[in-house]
Amino acid sequence: LLSRIRLLGRRCFYSPVPLNRSSFMRFIGMLIVAGVIGFSNGAEGQDQGLDGGLWSACKDPLGCGCIFSGFPEGTQGGVGNHVDVPFTTAHNPADGEPFTVDLWVNKFSEGSYSGDGGRSDLMSPLSNADNSNRWRSGFMFYARSRGNKWEFHWGTGRTGRTNKWGKIVADGVPYVEDEWTRLTASYDPDFRRGTMTFHVGGSVFTKESVEFRPNTADAVLRLGAGSTFDNEPKYRWVGGVKDVRILTGVFTPDEIDDGIDKDLVLWSSCSL
């Protein structure tokens, strides 16, 4: 199978063999030396998202993203295991408004699963969830090792023992390790009493009549890990995350590629 690497300027390069983490990093180093890609050091504010320096904590930066080791701080992997973007209302969907989250992820076959010593079978490349009180809000992307499944979870705002989280499971579309996959999730509050849509590659999954409570508290946008009740990173990602965009409105991947008005972009890991 071909492993696809999407580079800046929408150029593409293909490798004829699957890439594990070690060969992937050697491959990236060759591209740097050849001048095919470049890394930002945080000085170009818009390229870093928000106020610049977003990827300064990333051990292995990759264009508009990062390669995460998955290990806790103080152990192998160092500080490069996740990146937190401070909460602002500007880059969070408002209550009752439509939104779309779009990103590219690469789950490496090497490295400890979850990386935090827990037995969870989940890994999260991106989370924006508030678990600090009895209400559940925000959203999370997951790869689940049981069944090799992609999942999208969201907070319903409920307080009971059940139905705190809604989710869509991409059944029939197993994740493939060491390959880049595009994940796009959107929420339309006005279509059929609230509809979540989850695009995985070329497949589309929907769930209707859903409740969604956006993150309105002081919870971070986290890349490379998920959140827990004490806001400590968990469900750590081992692999790459890049080209993250949060948009106002409901869009398909093709519509995003055709061009989105900058005024509709709540947050982006790349320059607009």
Image (tube, rainbow, N blue to C red):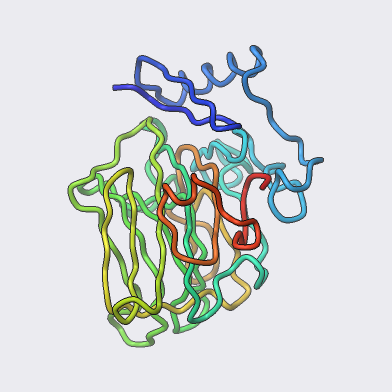
In the image: residue 68, left or right of residue 174: right
For this rendering, which residue is in front, 202 or 53? Answer: 202
Q: Where is residue 269 in the image (x, y as percent from the top left)?
A: 62, 48
Q: Where is residue 165 in the image (x, y as percent from the top left)?
A: 34, 73
Q: In this view, does 88 lie above or below 122?
A: below
Q: Is residue 199 above or below residue 135?
A: above
Quarter of the image where one finds residue 182: top left
Farthest residue to the left: give it: 172
Screen quadrant of the N terminus: top left
Q: How many labels does the image show?
A: 0
Q: Residue at x 44, y 58 (%)?
A: 251
Q: Is residue 19 above or below residue 131?
A: above
Q: Residue at x 59, y 17 (%)?
A: 31
Q: Where is residue 30 in the image (x, y as percent from the top left)?
A: 58, 13
Q: Which residue is drawn at 72% across and 42% down?
A: 56
Q: In this view, does 121 lie above or below 219?
A: above
Quarter of the image where one finds residue 16: top left
In the image: residue 57, left or right of residue 105: right
Q: Which residue is drawn at 41% across and 17% down?
A: 15
Q: Position of residue 50 (x, y in %)?
A: 72, 56
For this rendering, which residue is in front, 111 or 240? Answer: 240
